[in-house]
Amino acid sequence: MIRTQVVVAGAGPVGTVAAYYLAQQGIDVLVLEAGPDCAQDLRASTFHPPTLEMLDELGITPFLLDKGLKAPLYHYRDRRTGAVVEFDLGELSDVTRYPYRLQCEQYHLARALAEKLESHPKAQVKFSSRLVYLNQDDTGVDLAFETPFAIEKVRADYVIGADGANSAVRKWLGIGFEGFTYPEKFLCLSTKEPLEEYFPNLAHVNYVADPEEWLVLLRVPSVWRILLPAQPDTPDAELTSDENRDRVFQRLIGKTGVQTYHRTIYRMHQRVAESFRQGRAFLVGDSAHLNNPLGGFGMNSGIHDAFNLCQRLTKIIKNGPDEESLEQFSRQRRGAARSFVQAQTIQTMEMMKASQAEAQAKRRDELIATQADPAKRRQFLLRQAMFQSLADAAAIA
């Protein structure tokens, strides 16, 4: 039987952040990943300022800056009128050394940290290792994982579930995952077509509202990503077909035959676990909360979960038990997920897909008023940059 202090299930960005933080603190950690490597997930691509500050503690932010694009400006656009409301995170330069969103695919972070973990004396990473059993008692956690050739057993002091929406850790704990799934499917296309040549003053991040077909335009280093909704009864093969691609780009830029590099269909969820902690087991990231990607809060809030938890675990492992601290982790991060991330992403989704032009015009007028008022604009920027959510969570006793 393997013996370690902490098992982290999942080698995505949140799991590798948690594991590397603990290893750097001198804590033995084992990472179990069901896949053969760190998956090249295309959904998350935005790092917010406080997340970059946290990752700087791990020495990884300079690497991400080299890989990514700085995006201080982002736009809310009206597709029909062409009206643009611009916000500039550069106004927060007095509160952060990173006054911008960094556009960089999440897999760069996960893969870089996984490589560091594989050579770290306090860490082990096991790919193709699927968690199949979890049981805990007062002194530790027994786990089993399946490899291509065997079932192996582990005894750990604690386990962190960072194993995504279908979390085996959450299921073994029997923790409910309340919320809903949007009825629509969502199509994501990536292209190297220079969209900035078709739209005046296009930012790297654009939320484009329209009653008939809203969309999001995001620039990452290699491509533009286009996210738009689709009817749930439309077959996936039709949505990803050349014919549908041509329809999308004809409506968007008046051009067909545009080359795409990825055509992905997925569903969007709004769910929060009933608790982020049970005994010696914890949930972070998508294992604990799912939300639509508008605003880029999902991965970031997961990394915030990991830092909140691992700071506490480090103190407990080194200094002794603190039950209240672990309960506070669950209260704070669940509170952040419910009161900020869920509320903010649902509001943005409703604004984007409002069925009546009058409703969208009202929301646009509210954004214009916010942009024009220095105090309201600053508060808006602090919320969008996730500083306010961290402050609100820290205030939860």
Image (cartoon, helix red, strand yellow):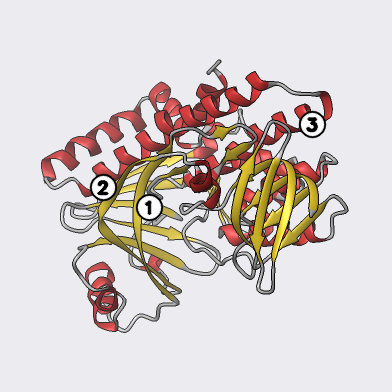
Residue 72 visible (yes or no) = no
Closer to viewer: mark 3 or mark 2 = 3
Circle nearer the N terminus (1, 2): 1
Q: Within 10 Å of the Cα at label 2, are there few (<14), some (14-19), or many (20+) other Cα atoms?
A: many
Task: Point out the frontmost of discs 1 and 2.
Answer: 2
Q: Is residue 356 above or below residue 109?
A: above
Secondary structure at numbered mark 3: helix
The mark found on residue 352 in the picture is 2
Q: Earlier in the sequence, mark 3 or mark 2?
A: 3
Mark 3, other Cα within 10 Å: few <14 / some 14–19 / many ≥20? some
The amino acid type found where label 3 is placed reads: Ile
- On the rendered structure, is 99 left or right of 290? right
User: Residue 184 at what x, y percent from top left?
Assistant: 24, 57
Asked if residue 15 can be seen in this view, the reply is: yes
Contact flag, marks 3 and 2 (Cβ < 8 Å): no
Front one among 243 and 335: 335
Quadrant of the rendering where the N terminus is positioned: bottom right
| Residue position marked by numbered label 1 in the rendering | 206
Whole-percent x and y of residue 84? 30, 47
Find the distance from the CA under tag 1 to the CA under tag 2: 11 Å
Labelled disc at residue 317? 3
Q: Is residue 135 above or below residue 185?
A: above
Q: Write the residue at 31% across / 76% down.
A: 240
- Residue projecting furthest to the right: 121
- Asked whether disc 1 touches disc 3, contact meaning CB atoms under 8 Å apart, the reply is no
